Image (cartoon, rainbow, N blue to C red):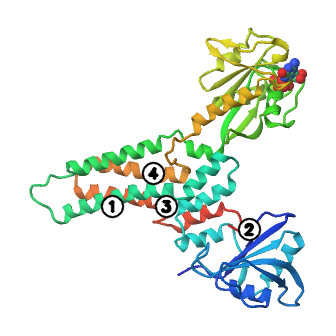
């Protein structure tokens, strides 16, 4: 039984001129609305049917469309759903949505309305609903794979399994409290303690994942650093395949941090160009250098670019920042010809940002470094801060439970842990949590 009032409608496809546009309706007035537009018999459920859509008031033809009728409950939202596959012109979309708005009981959908109704109808849990948002936002193949896996219930299965284990433990504990036997010791017995410890270990492993799943959603931060004129901006433009940063023979040109979003080996990367590292009397340039150092400190990976014209005299400030998270690059290979630069036993890559030589090796090495930081080796990763907070609450409660003095206190902590897990999947749904989650959706989802 749905608790939502009114029938909602929204354009489900992108805004702007396109071949097709899909408008979706959900609610008890969706069927009558379809009848009012087509003025003919309702099509068979789930059969694409061609129909002439007319304005219900004046009969003006609005489009020749394909319409689909999904009676409840076998629909996305679990309610009666209609899909109108229109021609994607702006006037067509406007004509049809205006006609819909004028019909009784219909209103435009708010962001996330459709998916929220689907969640309420039990079509999926919260982690799966969040996966739909992630899938729509996915820019790279790895993001798509992670979202699809979560949509398929990988996280639901994991968290539900933990919750089931805790509920069994709780039942066991409560039985001990309700029917105490004289020879049972206070607190936890060995089996229960072992079960609890095993779950705490599982939680620890899941929580200490280097934030891989969350970073895959946000993108890995990669900073290009190096001395002035080494070709940092040229390299960023090469990798971005556009002139995002100003390239100039005048040193000190780049001052602000310039970011481009890239797809490296299927992973999302936010690549930042920074000001050249040197002593500067210029206040603006000094601020740029401060920002460069700050970005370098927070970056997941650094690309240290050295000027091949000066090699092997590497800039000492940049050389001092080279660590295991750094890809060392010597630029201007077209001039200096050092193919495999070495520094302190570290092997660098010789490239020419100008001619493109060495760039494919650089991208390959960078891809391997990114993959090593984001790949989850088949385990479903933690993907959201919201989940992390609940899992930390769960973890804390279980650690407390392990040392609690009385069986009643152990049971209370396990109960809190169960609740924390339930918050992730929405088994313990609180309205304000739902508002926050579904607000992030786009309209029409
Ligand atoms: N010969 C040669 N010149 C380059 C190369 N990359 C950059 N440059 C030149 O070096 C100068 C500084 O380049 P830029 O990208 O602005 O360096 P940044 O100060 O490190 O950002 C410009 O005149 C570029 O044209 C390269 O691979 N070969
Ligand atoms: Mg620059």
3 vs 2, front mark: 2
| Label whose residue precedes the other's in the sequence (4 or 2) | 2
**In x, y percent, where is residue 10?**
74, 72
| Label whose residue precedes the other's in the sequence (3 or 1) | 1
Q: CA distance from mark 3 to mark 4?
A: 11 Å
1 vs 4, front mark: 1
Residue labelled 3 has its Cβ within 8 Å of some atom of ligand 2: no
Task: Tell me the quadrant of the picture where the C terminus can be found.
Answer: bottom right
Question: 285 or 330, which is in the foreground?
Answer: 330
Look at mark 3 in the image and give the residue it sits on: 425
2 vs 1, front mark: 2
Q: In the shown orientation, is residue 24 left or right of residue 213?
A: right
Question: Within 10 angstroms of label 2, few (less than 14), some, or many (20 or more) residues?
Answer: some
Asked if residue 114 is positioned above or below residue 313 in the image, the reply reads: below
Look at mark 1 in the image and give the residue it sits on: 167
| Label whose residue precedes the other's in the sequence (2 or 1) | 2
Which dot marks residue 391?
4
Question: Within 10 angstroms of label 3, few (less than 14), some, or many (20 or more) residues?
Answer: many
Q: CA distance from mark 4 to mark 2?
A: 34 Å
| Label whose residue precedes the other's in the sequence (3 or 4) | 4
Q: CA distance from mark 2 to mark 1?
A: 40 Å
């Amino acid at each position: 039984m749905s608790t939502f009032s009114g029938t909602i409608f929204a354009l489900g496809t992108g805004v702007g001129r396109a071949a097709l546009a899909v408008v979706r309706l959900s609610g008890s007035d969706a069927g009558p609305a379809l009848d009012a537009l087509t003025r003919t018999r309702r099509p068979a459920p789930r059969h694409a049917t061609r129909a002439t859509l007319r304005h219900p008031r004046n009969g003006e033809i609005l489009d020749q469309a394909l319409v689909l009728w999904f009676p409840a409950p076998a629909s996305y939202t679990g309610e009666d759903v209609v899909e109108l596959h229109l021609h994607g012109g702006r006037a067509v979309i406007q004509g049809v949505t205006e006609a819909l708005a004028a019909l009784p009981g219909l209103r435009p959908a708010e962001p996330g309305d459709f998916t929220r109704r689907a969640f309420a109808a039990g079509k999926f849990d919260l982690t799966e609903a969040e996966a739909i948002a992630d899938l729509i936002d996915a820019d790279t193949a790895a993001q798509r794979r992670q979202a699809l896996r979560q949509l398929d219930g990988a996280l639901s299965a994991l968290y539900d399994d933990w919750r089931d284990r805790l509920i069994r433990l709780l039942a066991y504990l409560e039985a001990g409290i309700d029917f105490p036997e004289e020879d049972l010791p206070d607190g936890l017995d060995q089996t229960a303690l072992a079960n609890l410890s095993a779950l705490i270990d599982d939680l620890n492993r899941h929580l200490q994942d280097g934030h891989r799943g969350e970073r895959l959603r946000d993108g890995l931060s990669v900073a290009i650093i190096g001395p002035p004129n080494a070709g940092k901006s040229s390299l960023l433009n090469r990798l971005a395949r556009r002139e995002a940063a100003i390239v100039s023979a005048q040193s000190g040109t780049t001052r602000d941090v310039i970011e481009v979003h890239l797809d490296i080996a299927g992973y999302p990367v936010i690549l930042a160009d920074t000001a050249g590292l040197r002593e500067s009397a210029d206040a603006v340039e000094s601020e740029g250098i401060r920002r460069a150092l700050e970005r370098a400190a927070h970056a997941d990976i650094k690309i240290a670019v050295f000027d091949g014209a000066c090699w092997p005299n590497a800039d000492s400030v940049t050389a001092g920042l080279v660590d295991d998270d750094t890809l060392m690059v010597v630029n201007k290979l077209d001039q200096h010809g050092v193919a495999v630069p070495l520094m302190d036993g570290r092997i660098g890559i010789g490239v020419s940002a100008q001619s493109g030589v060495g760039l494919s090796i650089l991208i390959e090495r960078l891809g391997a470094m990114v993959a090593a930081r984001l790949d989850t080796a088949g385990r479903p990763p933690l993907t959201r801060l919201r989940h992390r907070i609940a899992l930390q609450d769960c973890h804390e409660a279980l650690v407390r439970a392990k040392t609690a003095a009385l069986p009643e206190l152990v049971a209370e902590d396990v109960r809190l842990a169960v609740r924390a897990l339930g918050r992730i999947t929405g088994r313990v749904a609180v309205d304000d949590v739902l508002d926050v989650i579904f607000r992030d959706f786009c309209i029409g989802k």
